[in-house]
Image (tube, grey):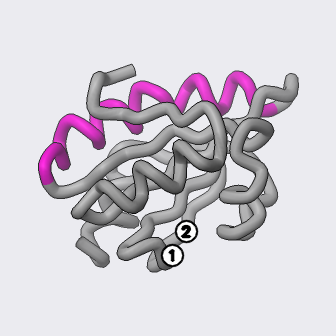
Amino acid sequence: MAKPVHQPREDAEFDFILRMSGVPVLAYFIGTWPKAIEPCRAMDLVVGDVADAYAGRLTVVRADITRCPAATERYGITGAPSYVLLRDGEAVAHGTGPMTGPEVRELLDGHL
């Protein structure tokens, strides 16, 4: 995965990244249960490419649902992979399931 993707270990770190970002945040939620692992791994490259393409205009956070349960609940995440575009901590766009790079960019472009 590309360097510009943050990987918080817990909710407090997730919230810290949101507060310190200064730009919109794409929160990419992954799951570690058997049916979620492959789709989430497949998205790592796509999300990494998006992080590179939007560097300086977007912060990307890869959050494990089991390690960040409060964030998962706060943003209504019910499956993995899931994506939430946050502006000032408020969700402005959502996506769920495997997505192509152009689909992720479409999710972002209407809100950045």
The residue at the far right in this view is 34
User: In the image, is residue 111 above or below residue 23?
Assistant: below
Instruction: Evaluate if marks 1 and 2 touch, with contact meaning CB atoms under 8 Å apart.
Output: yes
What's the residue at 28%, 32% (across, down)? 4
Left or right: 14 in relation to 58: right
Q: Which residues are magenta?
A: 36-56
Q: Quadrant of residue 64?
A: top right
Q: Disc 1 to disc 2, how far (Cα)? A: 7 Å
Q: Residues within 10 Å of mark 1 (few under 14, many from 20)?
A: some
Residue of label 1: 91
Q: Which quadrant does the C terminus fall into?
A: bottom left
Q: Does dot 2 land on a helix, a strand or a loop? A: strand
Name the residue rendered at 73%, 60% in the picture: 77
Q: Is residue 103 visible?
A: no
Q: Amino acid at mark 1?
A: Ala
Q: Which mark is residue 74?
A: none
* Mark 2 neighbour density, 10 Å: few (under 14) some (14–19) many (20 or more): some
Residue sitting at x 74%, y 58%: 70
Which image quadrant: the N terminus? top left
Give the numbered dot on residue 94.
2
- Residue 98 part of the magenta-drawn span: no
In the rendered image, residue 38, in percent from the top left (x then y), is placed at 69, 23
Left/right placement of residue 47 relative to residue 4 reads: right
The dominant secondary structure in magenta is: helix
| Residue at x-position 37% and y-position 34% | 5
Q: Nearer the viewer, residue 94 or 27?
A: 27
Spot occupied by residue 31 in the image (x, y as percentages of width and height):
74, 35
Q: In the rendered image of this protein, does residue 105 appear above or below residue 90? A: above
* In the image: residue 21, left or right of residue 12: left
- Residue 75 position, x and y percent, is 66, 68
